[in-house]
């Protein structure tokens, strides 16, 4: 079945980095953009960035620019999100999500829409000294 | 950046009754060239990721029950659950995907059973 499976929970010191993986199955990985979303406890989700899994193009939210790097390994159908200079507000659940990639006519497009139709189960990151 | 504001923050509805959640964007998210509103709705239950319900403001995602419907245009949108079921207890988020990133979510509406 179509799914994204993320790596497990992490505990990090302030200032450290964390790298989370997101393995795709049930669909052609390189045909879809993959996004990363942060959700702090009790807060709304926040879009961090995305990668075009086909050509590797990335775009990041200005809020996370300079701290976040999204990469992918097409041979493993896996996307990665690396977040550095961790601080307390990064204690959150991080999700990867597949882009819907449909045109307004409802046809697969392969392009970014900004709608997230398949989500990973989430990875809890705790930043604490 | 476009700011999304939902109302109410929480809502209690009796089983079988209608639930209505509102979402307002700080600017129009209607793209006039294709007459599409770039608005999505998600449902999130505790400990789970969000689940896509509706996109283009009113297109129901495959597998979503037809008691869920979306409406509205421009800056004002509504998610309606026509007959509340126990499994609909969740937090609901609207999200705009109109502009180049960042795409933004509303603050959420917590729906409970009265």
Image (cartoon, grey):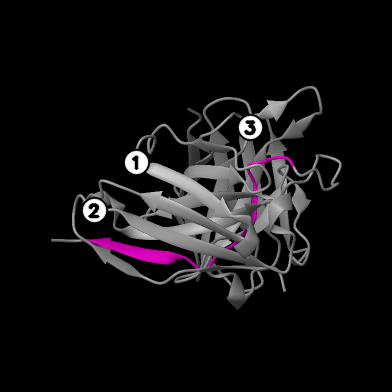
| Chain letter behind tag 3 | B
Q: How many numbered tags mark residues here?
A: 3
The residue to which callout 3 is attached is: B98
The residue to which callout 2 is attached is: A16
Q: Secondary structure at mark 3?
A: loop
Magenta span includes A40: no
Residue at image coords 43%, 44%: A69
Residue that lies at the very extreme toward the top in this rendered image: B33
CA–CA distance in space, label 2 to label 1? 11 Å
| Disc number for residue B110 | none
**B51 or A56: which is nearer to us?**
A56
Q: Label 2 crowding class (10 Å Cα cut-off): few <14, some 14-19, many 20+? A: few
| Chain letter behind tag 1 | A
**A35 or B24: which is nearer to us?**
A35
Using the image, determine if residue A115 lies above or below residue A57. below
Q: Please give left or right for residue B34 compared with residue A86 in the image.
A: right
The magenta segment is A111-127
Residue at image coords 74%, 51%: A31
Q: Please give left or right for residue A90 compared with residue A122 in the image.
A: left
Circles 2 and 3 in contact, beta carbons < 8 Å: no
The residue to which callout 1 is attached is: A67
Q: Is residue B62 visible?
A: yes
**A105 or A58: which is nearer to us?**
A58
| Chain letter behind tag 2 | A
Residue at image coords 72%, 26%: B31
**B9 or A86: which is nearer to us?**
A86
Labels 3 and 1 within one chain: no
Percent across and percent down for residue B100 are 58, 29
């Amino acid at each position: 079945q179509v799914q994204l499976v993320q790596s497990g929970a992490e505990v990090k010191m302030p200032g450290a980095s964390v790298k989370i993986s997101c393995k795709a199955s049930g669909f052609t990985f390189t045909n879809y953009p993959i996004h990363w979303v942060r959700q702090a406890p009790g807060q709304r989700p926040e879009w961090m960035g995305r990668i075009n899994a086909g050509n590797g193009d990335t775009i990041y939210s200005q809020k996370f620019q300079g701290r976040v790097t999204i990469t992918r390994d097409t041979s493993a159908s896996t996307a990665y999100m690396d977040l550095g200079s961790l601080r307390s507000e990064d204690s959150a659940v991080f999700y990867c999500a597949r882009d819907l990639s449909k045109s307004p006519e409802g046809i697969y497009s392969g392009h970014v829409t900004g709608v997230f139709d398949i989500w990973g189960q989430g990875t809890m990151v705790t930043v604490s000294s | 950046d476009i700011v999304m504001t939902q109302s109410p923050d929480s809502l209690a509805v009796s089983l079988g009754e209608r639930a209505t959640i509102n979402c307002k964007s700080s600017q129009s998210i209607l793209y006039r060239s294709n007459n599409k509103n770039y608005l999505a709705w998600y449902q999130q239950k505790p400990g789970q990721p969000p689940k896509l319900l509706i996109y283009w403001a009113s297109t129901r995602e495959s597998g979503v029950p037809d008691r869920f419907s979306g409406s509205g245009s421009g800056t004002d949108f509504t998610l309606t659950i026509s007959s509340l079921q126990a499994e609909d207890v969740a937090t609901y988020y609207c999200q705009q995907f109109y502009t180049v990133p960042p795409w933004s979510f509303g603050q959420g509406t917590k729906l409970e059973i009265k």
